[in-house]
Amino acid sequence: MATIVAEPTGRPVVREPHELSFIRKYIFSSDHKVIGIQFLFLSLFFLLAGGLLAMMIRWQLAWPGQPMPLGSLFPETMAPDGIMLPEFYNSLVTMHGTFMIFFAVMLLLVGVFANYLIPLQIGAPDMAFPRINMASFWVAVPAGLIALASFLVEGGAAGAGWTSYAPLSAMPEASGVSLGQQMWIVSLVLLGLSSILGSTNYITTVINMRAPGMTWMRLPLTVWALFITAILALLSMPVLTGAMIMLLFDQTIGTHFFLPAEGGQPLLWQHLFWFFGHPEVYVLILPAMGFTSEILANGSRKPVFGYHAMVGALVSIAVLGFMVWGHHMFQSGMNPLLATSFMVSTMVIAVPSAIKTFNWMGTMWRGNLHFHTPMLFAIGFVMLFVIGGLSGIFMASAPFDIFIHDTYFIVAHIHYVLFGGALFGIFAAIYYWFPKMFGRMMNEKLGKVHFALTFLFFNLVFFPMHTQGLAGMMRRLYQTTGYEHLEGLQWTHVLITISAFGLFLSGMLFAVNFAWSLFRGPKAPANPWNATTLEWQTPSPPMHGNWEEVPVVYHGPHEYSHPDVADKDWLAQNERPDVVSPARP
Amino acid sequence: MAGAVTYYAGRAPERGLAVYTQKVGMWVFLASEVMFFTSLIGSYIILRFGASETWPLPGEVLNIPVTAINTFILICSSVTMVKAFAAAEVGDKRGTRLFTLATALIGSTFLGVQILEYRELLHEGFGPSSGLYGSTFYTMTGFHGFHVFSGVCCLFWASWKAFRGGYDNRAYKGLEVLGLYWHFVDLVWIILFTVVYLI
């Protein structure tokens, strides 16, 4: 074999000369790893909060008008005698969506993993702007607190749905919620600021902080996905911020942007919201696709099938994602010709999505499959994403969409992509990177039980919702009784609610596993999964500055079972070519 | 074993663009700012087309000559900003001080004129709740003013730093990055002046 001269080793990482104080180290830290972990605790808290709201929603749907367990804890304004009021139900639905989309899934995907993984996977000592990174966390905290606190103010939390369509959201006299709605806006403007600060950092870091030898086509797919996601968030979040500010002004200083009586245009809100909203959908799924690609390669001990096609698919999904927002508005009285063009552009997204799906199958094909917990969740992601993606194609078709508009079919679809997709990807990623974050392994057995129960209950909860939607169950309905066409469906609501409780409890299993492993889990080695990317080539957890010296990258990101390597089935990105034992001399 | 060779050899070490990190960061941040102003200006265009019969003609409500002079003032501040950066680049500390402070002062003048304009309009009874025209006018120019205000604050801070000799031909990045922001704010105003005042 021809010998290759090793490239020079990297520079030593500049480290702080003295120990940092407790506050600078764990609270106002500018270390990307600490910030990632701070985001992890914040977003898991909101995942729990959003889950609890969902349980209350489910109670009302299965047993309308029955007092909730522990319902007496709620004040008169929410649930007198434990029976929830319609206004409170509206707040629950709105805040469940808000918590889950903005504070749980988005923060888990981007706040946690972009922060934690980007510098480690590209071989950088930290983010490009560590203090801006710290600011992005400390802006997200008050955003979350304001959203939570809005339940306590007069009139309750925002109740106009997570999409807050105007004019309902702009007219407190119509919705009965004034301060709650304004707090909702302020909270999301702050979260948008946090997201923009974060995205600026992620994009700059990926562009300019890569280790020597880390070419664009050697970036792990997780980094690619997070990079593209950051671009989407960077360009879509400000549009939401602009819309939110106009909505806030309509409520507070008497402007008329969305109020038709004065010439304002309610439809403008829908356009602005969905111009943000559709790229946001991909913000919520692309990182999970990145994690899945990487974990499937690891669990199959094979390189990712079609790496370049995977990158191309990510990029084209992002570009197309900005051109399809009108498919949320087929019911708005849109010109059918325009609806057709949105329909076609939406359906085109099926092409890159299918490329990804087939490449995941290609990655697993004839692999040496290891079914560890992250792998199980990654496979679950692929299966459920396919179901959610296919119902997405149904809905892209304007005639069908008009039929199922604002029904539980939509609810089923969004949960298949956001829970079955994004959240399964998140669970896979947490199980996979937990050892790196905390230096301890999570319990495999509990993890597998968690997966099995989550998969089972998830499908029991959300699959029947397709049928309910086709049967005419409306999306934000408070009371299921009293509608002739819904009478036969009541038993399905009960089935779904009982399964939802099961789903929540299996989530608790994860919480127990997480908390227990944090303190009692077995110590993790540097590279427990025999993985190839850079973060596994430094101790678990990595020291401040990540590396003893900046690594030099020689190989692609997912080099498993390489034919030229004899003694192991993986090849780390920074392994020097002259010390790898050749299979064929 | 030709295959193995191409596999291992790889490409020469790659480390980002030939542009320093702070500058890349500012470009990226400005991309989001473009989208923010696009949402406001785009909404303005949509709302105006929807209510074109009742929309006031240019000059009917707003005082175009005063704002035209104010626009010229803001453009002048972009010139002094460039001069400040050019002076720092060649190590002319006196020029850096002078031009940075000049930019901050000219920016403040712009803000002062804008505040006087607001006072005048409010006095005439034209406020943010005066129909769509008032809503869009105050939101767009107000957010632009907020951006100018942030820029002016940074410029005063930069002047303070310049007076302490903080910028020279090795350390001028901060000034260049601030300059990018300042030119962007200036450019937004030229667009706003055109769409809000002139057409």
Image: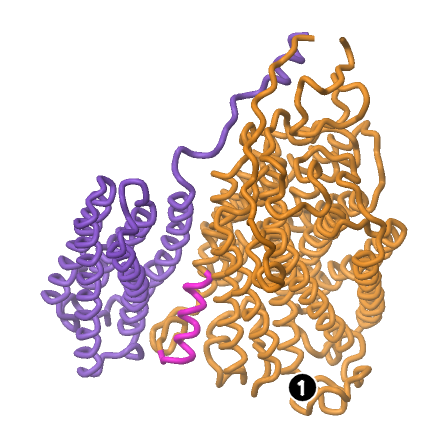
Chain colours: A orange, B purple
> Mark 1 sits on what residue?
A78
Asked if residue A375 lies left or right of residue A475, the reply is right
Q: Position of residue A581 (x, y in %)?
A: 76, 18
- The chain containing the residue under callout 1 comes to A
Q: Position of residue A305 (x, y in %)?
A: 69, 29
Who's the residue at 41% across and 63% down the image?
A242
User: Which quarter of the figure has residue B155?
Assistant: bottom left
Residue A387 in sight: no
User: Which quarter of the figure has residue A454?
Assistant: bottom right
Who's the residue at 78% across and 45% down the image?
A374
In the image, residue B82 sits, relative to residue A83, either above or below, namely above
In the rendered structure, does residue A241 fall within the stretch colored magenta?
A: yes
Residue A520 in sight: yes
Please name the amino acid that badge 1 sits on. Met
Asked if residue A461 lies left or right of residue B77, the reply is right
Secondary structure of residue under mark 1:
loop
Q: Count numbered badges in the picture.
A: 1
Q: Position of residue B191 (x, y in %)?
A: 24, 55
Which secondary structure type mostly characterizes the magenta part of the structure?
Answer: helix
Nearer-the-camera pick, A444 or A152? A444
Nearer-the-camera pick, A556 or A83? A556
Magenta range: A240-254
In the rendered structure, does residue A195 fall within the stretch colored magenta?
A: no
Q: Position of residue B102 (x, y in %)?
A: 17, 58
Who's the residue at 56% across and 62% down the image?
A28
In the image, residue A440 sits, relative to residue A167, either above or below, namely above
Report the quarter where the C terminus of chain A lies. top right
Outermost residue, front side: A18
In the image, residue A521 sits, relative to residue A61, either above or below, namely above
Crowd class of label 1 (few under 14; some 14 to 19; many from 20; radius 10 Å): many
In the image, residue B80 sits, relative to residue A255, either above or below, namely above
Asked if residue A153 lies left or right of residue B24, the reply is right
